Image (cartoon, rainbow, N blue to C red):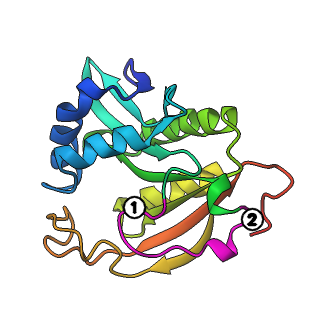
Amino acid sequence: MLAPYKIRSMAKSDLERVKEFTDRAIGTGYYSTSELEAIYQQSIFKNEKVLTLVLEIDEQIKGVRITYPPGQWQKGKGEGLNPTLWPYSLDETAYFQSLFVDPQLTGRGYGKLLSQAAIKNLKDIGAKGIVCHSWKESPHDSSGKYLRALGFELIAAHPLYWNEINYVCTRCGKPCLCTAEEMYLSLDDNKKGKI
C-alpha cells in the first residue's frame, strides 16, 4: 500500500530540496543548483504550467519527474538521440529528462504515478510524443520495466551515455559507465507500436 502522497508541479522554492534529494538518490553533483534552476525554467510551458513534477510524502521530496515540453529542448544529459527513427519531429516531441524516486520507495509504483501525471500534462498541451533515456543498469531493470509498461518502445542503446558528466554514479562511481536506452512513446494511439 502506498503512503499518502502528493504529486505537484515543481516550484522555484523547491530547488534546494530537489538538489538535496538528487544528491542522495542518484549521486552527489549529478545536478548543480544552477542546472536545476535552468531545468525549472526550461520546463515551463508558455509561461503558464511547470511540467516538471515532484513527489511529496510527509512534506519531503521523495521523487522528481523532469519533463520538457516540445520545442524547449535539444538533447538529454548526454549525447545520443535518433530523431529520424521517431514518428514525430523534435518540435512535436517532449523529453523526459530524468525520473528519480527515493531508493527506499522504488518498485512501489511512485515512478509510474509521476510519469502518468506528466503524460497527462503533455497530452493536455498537445505534445505528440515523448522521448527519454532509460538507465539500463537500474536495479531489477526498474527503469526499463516501468517505461515499457507505459508503452515506451526501445529506439537504441547508448553505452557510456553519462560518462562525460562530472558526478559520482551510485553504481559505478566516477566516471559513470552505465548505458542509456533511448525510448519513445507516441501519444497518438494510431502511431503506437509503429516505431
Q: Is residue 9 above or below residue 87?
A: above
Q: CA distance from mark 1 to mark 2?
A: 29 Å
Image depth: mark 1 or mark 2 in front: 2
Q: Indicate whether residue 83 is drawn in magenta.
A: yes
Q: Residue furthest front?
A: 47
Q: Is residue 110 above or below residue 77?
A: above
Q: Indicate whether residue 172 is drawn in magenta.
A: no
Type of amino acid at the residue the image marks with label 2:
Pro
Q: Which residues are magenta?
A: 74-88
Q: Which mark is residue 140?
A: 1
Q: Viewed as shown, does residue 28 lie left or right of 40?
A: left
Q: Are marks 1 and 2 in contact (CB under 8 Å)?
A: no
Q: Which residue is mark 2?
A: 87
Name the spot of residue 70 as percent of width and height, x first. Answer: 59, 49
Residue at the image point whose x is 23% and y is 73% from the top: 176
Q: Earlier in the sequence, mark 1 or mark 2?
A: 2
What kind of element bears circle 1?
helix
Residue at the image point whose x is 23% and y is 54% from the top: 26
Q: Which mark is residue 160?
A: none
Type of amino acid at the residue the image marks with label 1:
His
What kind of element bears circle 2?
loop
